[in-house]
């Protein structure tokens, strides 16, 4: 799905589905993804090493497959956000954000790139652009861009309403379960009532502003739980976790001598 259709689907209350690309680092491997199943993909660049050249190659390949590309950058850094947009990303996911000024500048470089410095600060603080012509030009470019805010700590949840109100638009709220539960003092206790309650709170606040929430869960049980809570920006697993699950499933069945009931199990090529 292209970025404009993806944004429109979410604005109309619909759902979109995607995964995270953690291990894939080339256009050749990205070409195996299918837009029949994936509306978007998040390129992991916070915990996985990525060059801007790799990001450009991968975002181009995703665009050719009609899959929206969103890059999770290393930190709420406006310079990195701007450079990543220049490298071809359709959207930016700013991780672990708590500071409103960092949020505003990262949003500005995502939506209004190449504007920067004093002019960008004036736009963010007052809404005043250098000219009407500049405003029309920048807003036309931003129609197909996405800005995702990473809410991954208790302070971020407590300040979520203020962060949402600090910029003119947020296209999605990202929740990282590991960081969030660690901040809560219950690392990886994703079946706890405390975790469920804080997710409900995040979704309630976000949806009040018509902002969809993506929760990065890695297995079907937890992703179905996300949907049940009201997540609409569905983020399921990663290339690494899905490959691991498929390898475990297939080779477990082969070793046990279990025959597949499926007549067609996928592509006939082994690569």
Image (cartoon, helix red, strand yellow):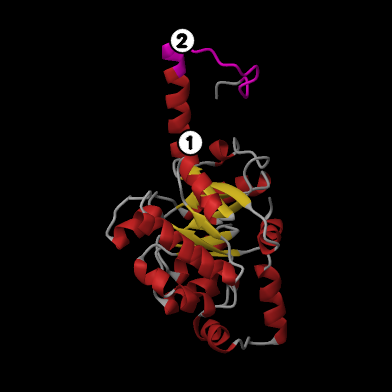
Along the polypeptide, which appears first: circle 2 or circle 1?
A: 1
User: Where's residue 73, x and y in %?
Assistant: 45, 59
Q: Which mark is residue 242?
A: 1
Callout 1 secondary element: helix
Above or below for 125 versus 245: below
Judging by the rendered image, the residue that carries numbered circle 2 is 257
Task: Please give the name of the residue rendered at 36% of the width and 65% of the height, measured from the top-left corner.
Answer: 153
- Between residue 134 and residue 161, name the one nearer to us: 161
User: Where's residue 72, x and y in %?
Assistant: 47, 57
Task: Please give the name of the residue rendered at 44% of the width and 53% of the height, measured from the top-left corner.
Answer: 45
User: Magenta part of the protein: which range?
Assistant: 253-268
Q: Are there few (<14), some (14-19), or many (20+) residues within 10 Å of tag 2?
A: few
> Is 257 one of the magenta-colored residues?
yes
Above or below for 110 versus 10: below
Above or below for 109 versus 13: below
Q: Assign the magenta stretch its main secondary structure.
A: loop
Callout 2 secondary element: loop
- Between residue 164 and residue 45, name the one nearer to us: 164
Which tag is nearer the camera, tag 2 or tag 1? 2
Whole-angstrom CA distance, mark 2 to mark 1, is 22 Å
Task: Please give the name of the residue rendered at 61% of the width and 68% of the height, measured from the top-left corner.
Answer: 210
- Can residue 198 be seen in this snapshot? yes
């Amino acid at each position: 799905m292209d970025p404009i259709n993806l944004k429109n689907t979410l604005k109309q209350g619909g759902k979109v589905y995607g995964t995270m690309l953690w291990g894939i680092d080339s256009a050749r491997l990205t070409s195996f993804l299918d837009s029949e199943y994936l509306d978007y993909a998040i390129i992991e660049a916070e915990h996985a090493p990525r060059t801007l050249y790799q990001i450009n190659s991968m975002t181009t390949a995703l665009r050719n497959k009609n899959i929206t590309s969103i890059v999770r950058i290393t930190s709420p850094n406006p310079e990195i956000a701007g450079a990543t947009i220049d490298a071809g990303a359709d959207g930016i996911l700013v991780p672990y954000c708590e500071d409103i000024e960092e949020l505003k500048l990262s949003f500005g470089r995502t939506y209004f790139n190449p504007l920067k410095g004093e002019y960008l600060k004036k736009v963010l603080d007052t809404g005043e652009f250098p000219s009407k012509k500049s405003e029309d030009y920048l807003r036309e470019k931003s129609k197909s861009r996405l800005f995702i805010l990473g809410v991954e700590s208790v302070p971020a949840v407590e300040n979520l309403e203020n962060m949402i109100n600090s910029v003119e638009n947020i296209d999605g709220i990202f929740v990282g379960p590991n960081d969030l539960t660690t901040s809560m003092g219950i690392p990886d206790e994703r079946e706890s009532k405390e975790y469920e309650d804080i997710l409900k709170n995040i979704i309630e606040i976000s949806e009040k502003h018509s902002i969809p929430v993506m929760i990065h869960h890695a297995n079907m049980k937890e992703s179905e739980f996300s949907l049940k809570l009201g997540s609409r920006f569905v983020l399921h697993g990663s290339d690494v976790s899905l490959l691991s699950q498929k390898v475990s499933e297939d080779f477990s069945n082969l070793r046990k001598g279990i025959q597949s009931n499926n007549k067609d199990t996928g592509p006939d090529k082994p690569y």
